[in-house]
Image (cartoon, helix red, strand yellow):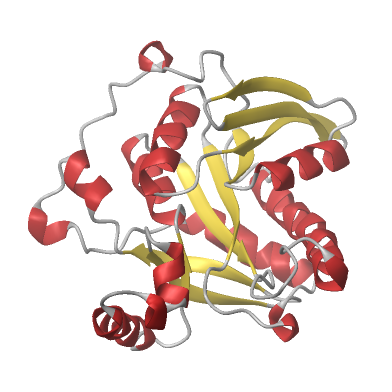
Amino acid sequence: MKKCAFTIEQNVIVKATIPKRGIVSSNPERSLRLASHFFENPIPKIQSWGVGILTGEVLYEGTREEFFFAYVPMGASGSAHAFHEIFAAGAQAVVRLGSNDVWVQEKDMDSLILVSESRGLRGLSWDHGIEAEEVDLPLIPDAELKQRLIKSCHQNRFPFSERVCFNVDDYHAYLYPELMEQPERIRQRLDTYNSFGPYSRDMETASLFLKAHQFEAKAASVLQNVFKQKQESPYEGSSGDKAKINEIKIAGIIMNALLDKSVIN
């Protein structure tokens, strides 16, 4: 593969170098909550055009390590723009902490999903220059980083499953196909997804994997099971309080994996 020629010089938003390791989300409030929890003095590095990066130091095995929490726009194209600039600005190992976009019940909240591969990144892959017959091939996380995440889940006794993640650009269509103009077409696609067994959906994992591959960086994706289909917003009420407690636990699991010296020097 040809080495990526892009550098921070071509960036539009991220104009300063950032730490090598970090956690990204498409939920700004989540990133802000986590930065406030894990950093003694979070430093807002970037806050522009829907992209935010907060940097700080965390203690790991007796040494202080630089780290970042970032939020990026929702969806494949907007997040890909941000991921591109994050890698160009110096990130070498990134884990997405997102939420699973399938129907989630409260009983699912005490488990997480490790994405084993992501599929269905079509428009962005086309613009990226990928051959038409290859746009539906799976995009794969970094194997070493994924194994570190598995080990960290075991160490923290946090249940998980490995699942295929399908990229979707219309969140509501796949949750409520009966309300769409062409419900049968969407149900056919859902039948295809179901043929993979238990699976997940989201809007940013595939673009992260694509851009990490372009920059020869390491990336993985962890999806939290957040109970969204309710009258309150996802982070309100008792299930919302539980989600916020679990996101701290899950972020700790991810940080333990990212900060291991085997991931990057």
* Image: 51 above or below 113: above
Q: Residue at x 26, y 77 (%)?
A: 182
Q: Residue furthest top?
A: 9
Apparent side of residue 235 relative to residue 119 in the rendered image (left or right) = right
* Image: 225 above or below 46: below
What is the quadrant of the N terminus in the image? top left
259 and 36: which is toward the camera: 36
**x and y percent of residue 146 in the render?**
54, 60
- Residue 78, image quadrant: top left
Q: Residue at x 27, y 46 (%)?
A: 124
What is the quadrant of the C terminus in the image? top right
Q: Residue at x 63, y 38 (%)?
A: 22
**x and y percent of residue 248 in the render?**
81, 55
Apparent side of residue 14 relative to residue 128 in the rendered image (left or right) = right
**x and y percent of residue 83 in the render?**
45, 36
* Image: 181 above or below 72: below
104 and 10: which is toward the camera: 104
**x and y percent of residue 214 in the render?**
32, 38
Apparent side of residue 250 relative to residue 129 in the rendered image (left or right) = right
Residue 180 is at least partly visible in this image:
yes
Total number of numbered discs in the rendering = 0
Residue 61 is at least partly visible in this image:
no
Apparent side of residue 184 relative to residue 250 in the rendered image (left or right) = left
